[in-house]
């Protein structure tokens, strides 16, 4: 299992790729490392933040898709009904858009820093977009 480091806002998280469950999604995302972007708070999904990716086409389909990622899980929605995006759950999530319920591939899980998830989410909610960076460990 490949490890990575994620810097989100002022927090650092250790994480792993879920290569066994989502090999294609992990392989495609690894090609883009290191990856930097911004996280904004979700609109309909609950306690999560997301990286909007517009019409980016990674050539992916569903692997181990879910609408209910656990806190500390990253899912990649490959696009279709709504825009392509990466969602990071910091609490309870029911992944949705204005078009209805969606599902994304769970491809990264954090392994340390869980105690900072709620603070990160509340920072994004109340203070706005925050930087995020994914790097190989």
Image (cartoon, rainbow, N blue to C red):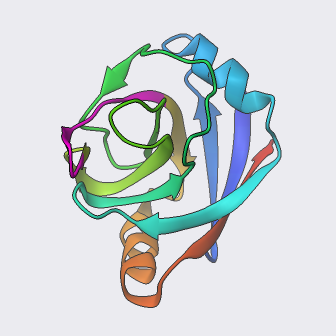
Residue drawn at 28 percent across, 64 percent down? 43
Is residue 1 at least partly visible in the picture?
Answer: no
Residue lying furthest bottom: 127
* Residue 77 sits in quarter: top left
Which residue is drawn at the image coordinates 54% and 65% (left, top)? 39
Q: Tell me the residue at 49%/40% (across/down).
A: 84
**Point 63% across, 77% down: residue:** 10
Q: Nearer the viewer, residue 50 or 21?
A: 50
Which x, y percent locates residue 8? Answer: 61, 66
Instruction: Decide which of 46, 109 is in the foreground and name it.
Output: 46
The part of the chain drawn in magenta is 97-106
Main SS, magenta region, reads strand
99 is within the stretch colored magenta: yes
Q: Position of residue 64 (x, y in %)?
A: 39, 16
* Quarter occupied by residue 90: bottom left
Q: Quadrant of residue 63?
A: top left
> Which is more toward the observer, 32 or 119?
32
Quadrant of the image for the N terminus? top right
Where residue 36 sits: x, y (%)? 74, 57
Above or below for 12 versus 135? below
| On-image quarter of the C terminus | top right
């Amino acid at each position: 299992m490949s490890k990575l480091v994620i810097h989100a806002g002022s927090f650092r998280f250790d994480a792993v790729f879920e290569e066994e469950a989502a090999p294609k999604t992990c392989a495609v995302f690894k090609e883009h490392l290191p990856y930097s972007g911004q996280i904004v708070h979700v609109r309909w999904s609950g306690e999560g933040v997301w990286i909007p990716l517009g019409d980016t086409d990674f050539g992916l389909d569903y692997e181990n898709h879910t609408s209910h990622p656990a806190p500390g899980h990253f899912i990649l929605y490959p696009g279709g009904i709504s825009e392509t995006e990466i969602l990071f759950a910091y609490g309870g999530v029911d992944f949705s858009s204005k078009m209805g319920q969606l599902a994304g591939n769970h491809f990264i899980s954090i392994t340390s820093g869980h105690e900072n998830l709620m603070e990160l989410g509340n920072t994004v909610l109340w203070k706005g977009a925050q930087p995020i960076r994914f790097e190989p460990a």
